[in-house]
């Protein structure tokens, strides 16, 4: 299967979305947020940034990836860089482009970039999304690699300064799907998930990312989601509803707060986590 390198760097047409208090509040509740500003729908939590770009992201991915490869795609990495938090009442205009295709022995990665701006054309956020097409090899690649956020070895082996555990509800995927617009059957239908080689439905990676981001803020004594300037993770293992996520927050350094997260069996489900916070990362 060949990926279309001619489409690299070509932006999709922009799409506008009006952001309501109800939508922000619903997303906060679907991710078990505790910050009152978010629950009231006044300000978006960091991972809500995916909602306005969801459609353009799919357009950009399909512009380079052959349709027959799409059933083999998994979400590999997410890197959200926030300039101005999304707030209720904003009109958010977003676009996306595939910026890299990289062929590996085990499959092919596609690097996507998104950009969201407000009605005055002020940049709200940029995101890098890496998709991995399992077992799809051959052909040539090119373009950009995603920005690096690998955890330094000395921090990976360091004792956590905080390790909060949050339960993942049995209905978490249904609630998250409604609030986010991500109705992928892997998260909602046991039969479809099992046909793809999964044990059953799995929790949306971005939902887990939201849980981990909240854990990082809690570890720093911060209850304002607007403090997050960058949030990045690599998705390393699926997780089932009804389990519990433990986020292991490492000692803060100058470039931010590093973290990873495990399921109830101690398996790492989110790795190479990085949160950069207002005020220099800590």
Image (cartoon, rainbow, N blue to C red):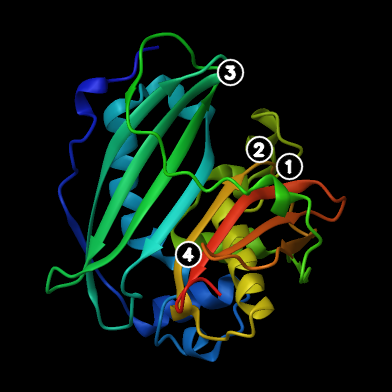
State which mark lies toward you, 1 or 3. Answer: 3
Q: Earlier in the sequence, mark 1 or mark 3?
A: 3
Quarter of the picture holding the C terminus: bottom right
In the displayed structure, 54 sits above or below 23; it is above
Give the residue pinned by disc 2.
Answer: 193
SS at badge 1: loop
Give the residue pinned by disc 1.
Answer: 200
State which mark lies toward you, 4 or 1. Answer: 4
Q: Residues within 10 Å of mark 1 (few under 14, many from 20)?
A: many
Give the residue pinned by disc 3.
Answer: 106
Residue that extends furthest to the left in the rendered view of this protein: 120
CA distance separating discs 4 and 3: 29 Å
Q: Residue 116: percent from the left, percent from the top?
A: 26, 61
- Left-right relation of 209 to 86: right
Residue 239 seen in this snapshot: no
Q: Residue at x 20, y 22 (%)?
A: 6
Give the residue pinned by disc 4.
Answer: 47
Residue 136 — which label? none
Q: Residue at x 21, y 28 (%)?
A: 7
Residue 51 seen in this snapshot: yes
Q: Residues within 10 Å of mark 2 (few under 14, many from 20)?
A: some
Q: Earlier in the sequence, mark 3 or mark 2?
A: 3
């Amino acid at each position: 299967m060949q990926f279309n390198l001619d489409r690299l760097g070509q932006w999709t047409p922009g799409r506008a979305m009006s952001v309501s208090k109800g939508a922000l509040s619903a997303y906060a509740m679907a991710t078990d947020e505790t910050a009152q500003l978010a629950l009231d729908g006044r300000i978006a939590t960091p991972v809500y940034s995916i909602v306005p770009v969801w459609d353009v992201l799919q357009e950009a991915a399909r512009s380079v990836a052959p349709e027959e490869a799409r059933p083999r795609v998994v979400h590999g990495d997410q890197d959200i860089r926030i300039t101005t938090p999304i707030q209720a009442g904003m009109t958010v205009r977003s676009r996306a482009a595939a910026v890299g295709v990289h062929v590996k022995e085990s499959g092919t990665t596609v690097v996507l970039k998104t950009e969201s701006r407000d009605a005055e054309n002020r940049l709200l956020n940029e995101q890098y999304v890496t998709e991995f097409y399992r077992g799809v090899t051959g052909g040539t690649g090119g373009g950009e690699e995603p920005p690096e956020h690998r955890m330094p070895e000395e921090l990976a082996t360091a004792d956590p300064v905080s390790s909060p555990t949050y339960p993942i509800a049995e209905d978490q995927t249904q609630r998250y799907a409604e609030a986010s617009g991500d109705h992928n059957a892997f998260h909602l239908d046991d039969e479809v998930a099992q046909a793809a080689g999964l044990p059953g439905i799995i929790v949306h990676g971005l939902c887990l990312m939201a849980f981990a981001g909240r854990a990082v803020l809690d570890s720093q004594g911060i209850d304002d989601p607007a403090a997050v300037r960058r949030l990045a993770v690599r998705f390393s293992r699926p997780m089932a509803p009804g389990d519990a996520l433990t986020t292991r927050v490492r000692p803060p350094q100058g470039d931010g707060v590093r973290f990873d997260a495990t399921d109830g069996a101690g398996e790492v489900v989110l790795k190479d986590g990085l949160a950069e916070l207002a005020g220099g990362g800590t």
